[in-house]
C-alpha cells in the first residue's frame, strides 16, 4: 500500500487529500492507520479526502480503519470523504452498510 498525502488550507480549515494505491487488506490497513494517526494528531477539524482510484479491493481490516477515522473526525468537527470509489468497492460498502455511514463524493 502506497500513501501519498497532500495538505491544503482553505478558509482556515485544514484539508488533507490521501491518495492510496494498492490493496486495502490487513497489511495495507496497518499502513493507512499509521498515516491517519499522524494526520489526526496534527489537529482537530480537519477534512480528509481519501482517493481510492488505485485501490482494487478492500477487506474488513480496511473498512475498520475507515470507520475508526470517520468516528474520530466526526467527534472533532472534521469529516471523511471517499472519492473515485470503484463499483467493486461500492458493492462491498453497500453490502456491509458502510455506504450509509461514509461520505462518498
Image (cartoon, rainbow, N blue to C red):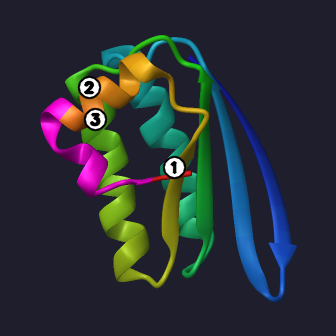
Q: Earlier in the sequence, mark 1 or mark 2?
A: 1
Residue on which disc 1 sits? 36
As measured in the structure, the alpha-carbon distance from the residue carrying label 1 to the one carrying label 3 is: 20 Å
As measured in the structure, the alpha-carbon distance from the residue carrying label 2 to the one carrying label 3 is: 4 Å
Residue on which disc 2 sits? 92
Residue drawn at the location 25% of the way across and 55% of the way down: 100
Which residues lie in the magenta part? Answer: 95-103
Q: Is residue 95 above or below residue 6?
A: above
Please indicate whether residue 53 sits to the left or right of residue 29 in the image: right
Q: Is residue 58 above or below residue 3?
A: above
Residue drawn at the location 80% of the way across and 58% of the way down: 7
As measured in the structure, the alpha-carbon distance from the residue carrying label 1 to the one carrying label 2 is: 22 Å
Q: Earlier in the sequence, mark 1 or mark 3?
A: 1
Q: How many marks?
A: 3
Percent from the top left, x then y, of residue 3? 66, 29
Residue drawn at the location 80% of the way across and 88% of the way down: 12
Q: Is residue 51 above or below residue 104?
A: above
Residue on which disc 3 sits? 93
Q: Quadrant of residue 19?
A: top right
Judged from the image, the secondary structure of the residue bearing numbered disc 3 is helix
Q: Nearer the viewer, mark 1 or mark 3?
A: 3
Q: Nearer the viewer, residue 102 or 91?
A: 91
Percent from the top left, x then y, of residue 10? 84, 78
Q: Count residues near mark 1 (Cα–Cα under 10 Å), then give few for <14, some for 14-19, many for 20+.
A: some
Q: Is residue 101 magenta?
A: yes
Residue drawn at the location 38% of the way across and 17% of the way down: 88
Q: Count residues near mark 3 (Cα–Cα under 10 Å), then give few for <14, some for 14-19, many for 20+.
A: some
Amino acid at each position: 500500500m502506497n500513501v501519498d498525502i497532500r495538505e491544503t488550507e482553505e478558509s482556515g480549515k485544514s484539508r488533507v487529500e490521501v491518495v492510496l494505491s494498492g490493496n486495502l487488506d490487513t497489511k495495507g490497513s496497518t499502513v493507512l492507520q499509521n498515516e491517519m494517526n499522524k494526520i489526526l494528531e496534527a489537529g482537530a477539524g480537519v477534512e480528509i479526502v481519501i482517493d481510492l482510484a488505485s485501490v482494487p479491493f478492500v477487506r474488513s481490516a480496511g473498512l475498520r480503519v475507515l470507520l475508526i477515522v470517520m468516528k474520530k473526525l466526526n467527534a472533532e468537527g472534521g469529516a471523511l470523504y471517499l472519492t473515485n470509489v470503484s463499483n467493486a468497492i461500492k458493492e462491498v460498502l453497500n453490502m456491509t452498510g458502510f455506504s450509509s455511514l461514509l461520505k462518498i463524493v
